Structure formats: structure tokens, C-alpha cells
Image: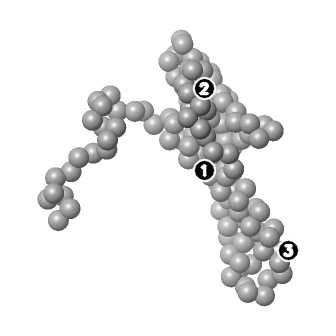
Amino acid sequence: MTQRTEGDRKRRRDLADAASGELPRLLPWAKDGKTCYLSTDGGSNSALSRLADDMEDVQLDVGTEVLEQSRPILANPMSPHSEVRYAALRLSECLDEAIRIAESRGDRIPLPDDEEAEDGPTLSAEAFG
């Protein structure tokens, strides 16, 4: 799993398409361990963006299947070491993909305009009972 650094985030902001003002989209796959980005003038309606959406759906479906198939292996204390290791490897791959998808989707959530929102919502003491 690759951790995104502040340098990675700055690079992404620097790659923002000047015409659209939109940041490049973090894609749900990597090439040779390097993150991939999509910059398109079609925004979220472009063919490549829809392909990335479809790929995210497939990756999440595969993750669900791997989780369901891994549960009995991990729950059985007599499962062979090789089966447990294989399940753990597949689960870690799926978790890496799910984290990348979550980061990509989070990056596409518009930021609030006012600076107070950066600190999070403010709630009165009554809100907590």
C-alpha cells in the first residue's frame, strides 16, 4: 500500500487542468506501483471517468467476494498456514484498492467555501445531551 504524501497532493493540485479548474482524478489502479491520474475536459461524464467508476465497482465487488470466501478459512483454527496466508494476501490487496477508491472519491467532494468549515462543524453543548 502506498501512502500519499503532501508532495503527492501538491503535485495533483499542480496538475489541475487550467481550462476546467478541476483536479485530476486519482484512478483506482496503479502502474508499476505509481499512482495514476486522469485529467479530462469531460469531467465525471467522460468515457474514461465512467470506465474508472465501473472499475471501482468491480474492485469493490471482488473485495466483497474475497472477504466472504476468507471468513471460513480465518475462522477455522485448523486451516493450513498456506490458506491463511493466501487469504491474508488477497484481503490486503482488496483493502489497498478500497483505500484508493475512498481517497479518490474523497478528493472529488467539493471543499466548503468558508474557512470555518475546515475546522469541522461547530455544535453547541446541547447537541451532546
Q: Give the mark, 2 or 3, whose residue is nearer the N terminus.
A: 2
Q: Position of residue 126 (x, y in %)?
A: 14, 59
Residue type, mark 1 in image: Ile
Q: Position of residue 38 (x, y in %)?
A: 65, 28
Disc 1 marks which residue?
A: 99
Q: Position of residue 44 (x, y in %)?
A: 56, 29
Query: Badge 1: few (under 14), some or many (20 or more) residues near its Cα, within 10 Å?
Result: some
At x 52%, y 22%, the residue is 22
Of 18 and 115, the residue lying toward us: 115
At x 21%, y 51%, the residue is 123
Which of the 4 image quarters holds residue 114?
A: top left
Of 88 and 51, the residue lying toward us: 88
Look at the picture and state if 85 lies above or below 4: below
Disc 3 marks which residue?
A: 82
Q: Element at badge 2? A: helix
Residue type, mark 2 in image: Arg
User: Which disc number belongs to residue 35?
Assistant: none
At x 68%, y 70%, the residue is 68
Residue type, mark 3 in image: Ser
Q: Give the mark, 3 or 1, whose residue is nearer the N terminus.
A: 3
Disc 2 marks which residue?
A: 11
In front of the other: label 2 or label 3?
2
The answer to whether residue 109 shows anywhere in this view is: yes
Which of the 4 image quarters holds residue 117?
A: top left
Q: Element at badge 1? A: helix
Query: Badge 3: few (under 14), some or many (20 or more) residues near its Cα, within 10 Å?
Result: few
C-alpha gap between disc 2 and disc 3: 41 Å
In front of the other: label 2 or label 1?
2
Of 104 and 32, the residue lying toward us: 32
